[in-house]
Image (tube, rainbow, N blue to C red):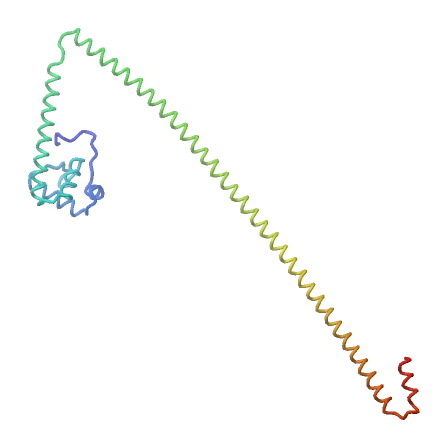
């Protein structure tokens, strides 16, 4: 295992790296081959490369470089070597620290007391975090309930509004149908009245024509019979 990789550091697959860097999967493999050709070390599972954050940054550098890919790869290899050397120095320093741990019982007791206090503080912090998490869960639960109540209220209001609109629409439709029927009845009544007037007028015209005919016949008779004409006006 490379000494610059942390125990809990996230690992990326080739597909994930392609999405992270914004390049095609074959391009990831191509860049990996170029880096290895120049001495770069990848964490591997068999023949499959496993990428960590520093590897992702190396691929981004290859993607964005203006130089030849091999030249950039050599620079990245040198940077990786520097990181590995720095990591090895850190491990040696940690090892020396353990070797120089206090041998005096009093100093050891002080160290143990310090560790006990740190553990107690950590435990107290964990308890506080647990309480905070519990409170957060309660808050989230209340928010979810409130959201459900609000959603239900909105749904009920929407249903009531829709029902009112439908009712008003039906009332308006019924009102318009009533008005239309009244207008039809009025129109039919007026047409009947007009027809009656026409019939009455025809009767008047017919009577006038009959009168005119009788008058004309009476005028054409001898004078001694004009008295009969007057009898017509007396009718």
Q: Residue 48 at x, y = what percent? A: 15, 41
Name the side, left or right, on which 119 lies relative to 150: left
Outermost residue toward the front? 223
Identify the residue at image location x=56%, y=50%: 166
Instruction: Say whether residue 131 is left or right of residue 64.
Output: right
Closer-to-camera residue (197/60):
197
Please say if 123 is above or below 137: above
Q: In the visual, does 229 lie left or right of 194?
A: right
189, 21: nearer the viewer: 189
Residue 157 horizontal/vertical position (percent): 52, 41
Q: Residue 223: horizontal and vertical position, in percent?
A: 91, 92
Give the quadrant of residue 202: bottom right
Residue in front for this viewpoint, 100 or 77: 77
Q: Quadrant of the C terminus?
A: bottom right
Q: Quadrant of the N terminus?
A: top left
Find residue 92 and report its image quarter: top left
């Amino acid at each position: 295992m490379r000494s610059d990789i942390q125990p809990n550091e996230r690992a990326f697959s080739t597909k994930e790296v392609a999405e992270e860097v914004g390049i095609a999967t074959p391009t990831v493999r191509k860049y990996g081959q170029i880096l290895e050709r120049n001495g770069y070390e990848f964490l591997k599972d068999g023949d499959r490369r496993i990428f960590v954050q520093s590897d992702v940054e190396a691929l981004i550098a290859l993607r964005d470089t203006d130089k030849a890919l091999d030249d950039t790869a050599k620079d990245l290899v040198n940077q990786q070597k520097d990181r590995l050397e720095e990591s090895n120095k850190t491990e040696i320093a940690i090892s020396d620290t353990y070797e120089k741990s206090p041998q005096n019982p009093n100093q050891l007791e002080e160290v143990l007391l310090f560790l006990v206090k740190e553990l107690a503080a950590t435990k107290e912090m964990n308890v506080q975090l647990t309480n905070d998490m519990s409170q957060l869960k309660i808050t989230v639960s209340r928010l979810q309930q409130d959201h459900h109540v609000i959603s239900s209220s909105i749904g009920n209001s929407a249903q009531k509004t829709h029902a009112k609109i439908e009712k008003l629409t039906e009332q308006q439709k019924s009102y318009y149908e009533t008005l239309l029927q009244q207008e039809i009845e009025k129109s039919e009544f007026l047409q009947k009245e007009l027809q009656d007037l026409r019939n009455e007028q025809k009767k008047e015209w017919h009577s006038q024509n009959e009168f005119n005919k009788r008058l004309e016949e009476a005028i054409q008779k001898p004078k001694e019979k004009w008295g009969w004409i007057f009898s017509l006006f007396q009718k």
